[in-house]
Image: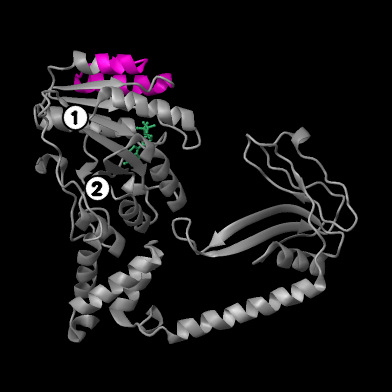
Amino acid sequence: MKLKTYTAGTMALALAEVKKDLGKDAMILHTRVYKHGAVMGLGGKQVVEITASDQATSAPPRRQSEPEALVRTPSRAPQSVPVVESKPAARPLVTRVEVAPVNDAALASLREDLSAIRRLVGQALANNAGTPGTLHGPLADLYARLRDEGIAPGTADALLAAVRSDISAHDMGDHARVASALSKRLAMLVSCVGAITPGHRQSDGRPLTIALVGPTGVGKTTTIAKLAAAYKLRFAKKVGLVTCDTYRIAAVEQLRTYASIISLPLKVALSDADVAEACKALGDHDVIILDTPGRSQHDSPRLDELAACVRAAAPHETHLVLSAAVAPQVLARAASHFSRVKPDRVIITKLDEAVNFGPLVNILRESGLRASYFTTGQEVPDQIEVASPARLASLVVGQGLSPSTNTTQPARAIGAAIG
Ligand code: GDP
């Protein structure tokens, strides 16, 4: 059996390729439509990918985890090509889509359109003076770095123009100078809180109340332990913990373990009323930190429940916790869905696992939220720092995560940065 993957700009073009290569009886085993070159899910070129076999009667390859009964062999249909499409588990695993036969005249016209578009794009690029194609030296390297890091194209172009205006032609060949100018400009694009909030009674007479919200697994509980340790051990504050993450026993146990190591009271709240009650009971403390259940962004009712739970604590700070280790689209989706909980700042975790730092700049710009803390590892209480624009910029420009590895912007230890 011959198995091949074909890609094209449209389904019709991809199918034509399949037909040309494998014949009209080809069996389509899988189709996928994705954007190539998209940034934060925007822009990019649509790509249709088809995996096909030349043997219409053979069964499609099956993933190890799929039960045999769920994988069927599509039957042949005259004048049409059956498509077997993989779906997320909640939906039926096998669906059949009838695709109309490709008309040669329509195909020829599509090809013409496509080459006309190619010509136009080529002309537009050629007319665009000052584009990266005309760059050289450090500026070219750093522009490529911005794009590789996932900085949105418009932002990268604007940064380029700004750096050109900041630096004399004479200094343009000096990599360190250009990198430093770029870092400064990049840092101006994001805003950060800049200090750990002093842990004392607020103007409303209540303890400083901090809630952390965000998807499961981003590191909320670990970060709460780091923050609680900072307030208690470095600033000698009286700290209490409340959790309403009671859907997972392990989550409560995890927080209970941290609470007992740091010697903090922990209140477990089963309802919104419990949350309010727990906060009231800890009213003589300096700081209360609320752990919340991670929510799937697809689960609207649960997000509403989460919002109600947070409201019950009436926090002074609501930190949306986002992991730097996920794809840009996942980051953007999480920020969009959790906006319902009305966070007023962002904690970025797992910087140590990030593949690219550009999406973090994009998400902070798009959400309009200030970053409060960065975390850089699993170790409690140390691997947390006060977020700083310069630090993020230096990571994007390539100056490294570790203070010992060539970074001009070392981490601001949380203890050194109280506001
Ligand atoms: P939660 O579900 O959001 O409460 O997430 P947890 O606090 O349980 O953390 C999930 C996993 O991420 C655990 O294995 C943590 O040790 C890990 N984790 C948390 N913060 C960081 C970090 O900054 N870097 C790395 N590499 N792992 C982290």
Residue 339, image x, y percentages: 36, 40
Q: Coloring scheme of the render?
A: one colour
- Residue 229 shows which numbered tag? 1
* Residue 266 in sight from this viewpoint: no
Answer whether labels 1 and 2 touch (C-beta < 8 Å). Answer: no
In the picture shown, does residue 55 fall above or below 140?
above
In the picture shown, does residue 323 fall above or below 9?
above
Q: Which residues are magenta?
A: 248-277
Q: Amino acid at mark 2?
A: Arg
Instruction: Give the mark nearer the N terminus: 1 vs 2.
Output: 1
Residue 125, image x, y percentages: 46, 81
Q: Quadrant of the N terminus?
A: bottom right
Q: Is residue 258 magenta?
A: yes
Q: Residues within 10 Å of mark 1 (few under 14, many from 20)?
A: many
Q: Residue at x 25, y 47 (%)?
A: 371
In the picture shown, does residue 313 fall above or below 178?
above
Q: Residues within 10 Å of mark 2 (few under 14, many from 20)?
A: many
Q: Residue at x 71, y 52 (%)?
A: 30
Q: Quadrant of residue 195?
A: top left
Of badges 1 and 2, the one in the foreground is 2
Q: Residue at x 31, y 27 (%)?
A: 310
Relative placement, left or right, of 265 versus 87 is left
Name the element at disc 1: helix
Relative placement, left or right, of 418 versus 371 is left
Q: Nearer the viewer, residue 118 or 73?
A: 118
Residue 135, image x, y percentages: 35, 82
Q: Quadrant of residue 348?
A: top left
Q: CA distance from mark 1 to mark 2?
A: 23 Å
Please state the total of marks drawn on the protein image. Answer: 2
- Residue 305 shows which numbered tag? none
Residue designated by label 2: 370
Ligand 1 quarter of the rendering: top left
